[in-house]
Amino acid sequence: LGKFSPGYNTLPEWEKPKNGFEGLVGDQPPLGFWDPAGYAKDGNVENFKRRREVELKHGRVAMFATIGYIVPEYFKFDGDLSPSSGLKFADVPNGLKALGVVPVAGWAHR
């Protein structure tokens, strides 16, 4: 029924107050500006823009970390990682398991 329902026109007209975040990501009809975590609660647009930029940077770092975890599943360097202990690059497991396999001097090497 929508506009033709009996109670539709009895509601008072109300316009949401401006908050400075209009037109930014998260400001979409019919809800308006949506901020469930309350990051924009202080009303400071500069802090909001900084938080948004930091979120993008963290997302990019997470994407690179994911690539760094997936690529070794399919690609291993040829050759020896530690010739003295007979350890080859192909023998090193992926992820945190590598911490127990790679010699300490290998982690400290520059």
Image (spheres, rainbow, N blue to C red):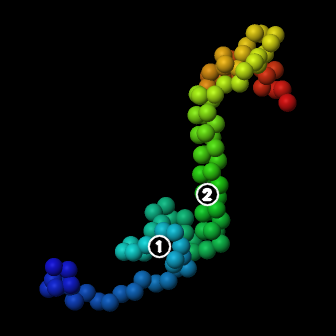
| Left or right of residue 83, residue 98 in this image | left
30 or 37, which lies in front? 30
What residue type is disc 1 on? Asp
56 lies left or right of 102: left
The quadrant where residue 76 appears: top right
Residue denoted by label 2: 56
Task: Tell me which residue sits at (47%, 73%) in the image.
Answer: 27
Q: Amino acid at mark 2?
A: Leu
Residue ID at (58%, 34%): 70
- For residue 89, which quarter of the picture? top right
Query: Which corner quadrant of the image does residue 28 belong to?
Result: bottom left
> Which numbered disc flags the more N-terminal residue, 1 or 2?
1
Query: Measuring 16% from the left and 79% from the top, which residue is drawn there?
Result: 1
Between 52 and 14, the one lying in front of the other is 52
Task: Give the residue number, with chain letter if any, for mark 1.
Answer: 27
Rendered view: 5 above or below 24? below
Q: Residue at x 46, y 84 (%)?
A: 17
Query: The residue tagged with tag 1: helix, strand or loop?
Result: strand
x, y percentage for residue 47?
Answer: 64, 68
Q: As rendered, which of 28 and 15 lies closer to the eye?
A: 28
How packed mark 1 is, by other alpha carbons closer than 10 Å (few <14, some 14-19, many 20 or more), is some
